[in-house]
Amino acid sequence: MSEWGWDLISCRTRAVLGAAKARGVKLGTTGPADLRRHLDERTANAVAFSERMRELLAGLRAVGLSQRAVVERLNKLGIAAPRGSAWSVAQLQRVLGRLSRADDLGAHPQLAAHPGTSPA
């Protein structure tokens, strides 16, 4: 009975993979080259979110609030964190770090696309 079950699973898997291949899905192409596009997209979204939050965070910091107090205020105001959840201090630190790096790289926009790379 179990051998029959494995054969059934194997046939279904082959059928699904064949249908995906017929739709043009590239199978087995994971790796750094394939993932770069997704990483770049996520990075761009994170930078855009940070920039949208820049003025609000600067205002909260300007009145002397600590990072923990800023997190509490953002959650109290109902402002969602980057992925839609409640804010944590770690998330705030990542956003502030991203804004700080953007400020540091302002004179070198070619570096902003790929943090950690050196100029050509």
Image (spheres, helix red, strand yellow):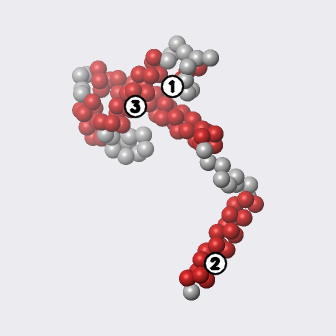
Q: Earlier in the sequence, mark 2 or mark 3?
A: 2
| x 31%, y 40%: residue | 88
In the displayed structure, would residue 111 be above or below residue 1? Answer: above
| x 75%, y 60%: residue | 22
Q: Are marks 2 and 1 in contact (CB under 8 Å)?
A: no
The type of residue carrying mark 3 is: Val
Residue 38 position by quadrant: top right
| x 69%, y 69%: residue | 15
Q: Earlier in the sequence, mark 2 or mark 1?
A: 2
Q: Mark 3 points at which residue?
A: 95
Q: Are marks 3 and 1 in contact (CB under 8 Å)?
A: no
The type of residue carrying mark 2 is: Asp
Q: Mark 2 points at which residue?
A: 7
Residue 8 position by quadrant: bottom right
- Badge 2: residue crowd in 10 Å (few <14, some 14–19, many ≥20): few
In the displayed structure, would residue 116 be above or below residue 40? Answer: above
Side of 42 relative to 70 (left or right): right
In the displayed structure, would residue 58 be above or below residue 77? Answer: above
Query: In front here: 44 or 19?
Result: 19
Residue 116: which disc? 1
Image spot of residue 40 (x, y percent): 57, 35
Q: Is residue 52 in sight in this rendering?
A: no
Task: Give the spatial CA distance, label 3 vs label 1.
Answer: 17 Å
Q: Is mark 1 on a helix, strand or loop?
A: loop
Q: Which of marks 3 and 1 is nearer the N terminus?
A: 3
Side of 48 relative to 86 (left or right): right
The label nearer to you, 2 versus 3, is 2
Image spot of residue 66 (x, y percent): 24, 27
- Badge 1: residue crowd in 10 Å (few <14, some 14–19, many ≥20): few
Task: Give the spatial CA distance, label 2 vs label 1.
Answer: 49 Å
